[in-house]
Image (tube, helix red, strand yellow):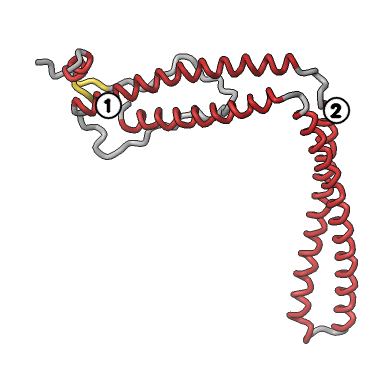
Amino acid sequence: MSKTVNRLSGLLIASALLSLANPAAIAQKPGAAKAGNDKVMTREELRSCMKLKAANLAHVKELNDKLDAHGDEREKLLAATPVDTGKGLREEAGRQLEIVKAADALVVENSKQIDAWNERMAEFHKNKKDMRQAFRKEQELKAERNVLQAKNDGLIADRTAKVAVYEASVAAANAAIVQTGSGNEEWNKRNKELALEEAQLKASRQRYTDDCASRRFREDDEKAINAGK
């Protein structure tokens, strides 16, 4: 009887999954070594691993076919949609977003000045008993606070108004997309479903890597399983 001991090959996918649904979903981390994983598999363990490998390979082919069809449908939807549909509105939303970001930067910068003022005011209260003209210094700090607060109120009000304009531009762009028809909505729904299916395949492939790929097995057991025993 042959005592040959082999290792299961890692699950290799010949055709890459060019996923529209989730580009990172099929990424597979290296299997972590587990205690006892170097033991020779029993026949039933080998049978389970072989079934898992076959199922994963079949699932990859099935998912590739779905993704191909999904990509073809996407191209048809794009071809049926005028190139400039909503383009100007999307560009306007982009411009408004940059305006909001600039307003954010001004608020953040003024907040840093307020933080610095708070630190100086805390330092003043800590040492004012030993200060000359402490009252005058306190009045100067309070006057500075009023200026900073007024500036902060103005910046926040300005940012709020700009955010409202940005949100209106986004709503207009989204409305233009919806008007292109229900095909986009249905495609997006299937896209989410494919992303979930990819995640499930990733988990199954990782299970194979962790539990099977580096395990040794007896060649006689493999032959017996292939013979239906």
Q: Which residue is mark 2?
A: 88
Mark 2: amino acid: Gly
- Asked whether, in this view, residue 173 is left or right of residue 202, the answer is right
Mark 1: amino acid: Ser
| Mark positioned earlier in the residue sequence (1 or 2) | 1
- Asked whether, in this view, residue 29 is left or right of residue 151, the answer is left
Whole-number angstrom distance, CA of label 1 to CA of label 2: 56 Å
> In the rendered image of this protein, does residue 16 appear above or below residue 112?
above
Which residue is at the far front?
A: 182
Residue drawn at (81%, 54%) of the image: 107
Q: Considering the image in quadrants, where does the C terminus appear?
A: top left
Q: Considering the image in quadrants, where does the N terminus appear?
A: top left
Quarter of the rendering containing residue 172:
top right
Which residue is at the far left?
A: 1
Quarter of the rendering containing residue 145:
bottom right
Q: Which type of secondary structure does the marked residue at label 1 adopt?
A: helix
- Label 1 packing within 10 angstroms: few (<14), some (14-19), many (20+): few
The disc label shown at residue 48, or none: 1
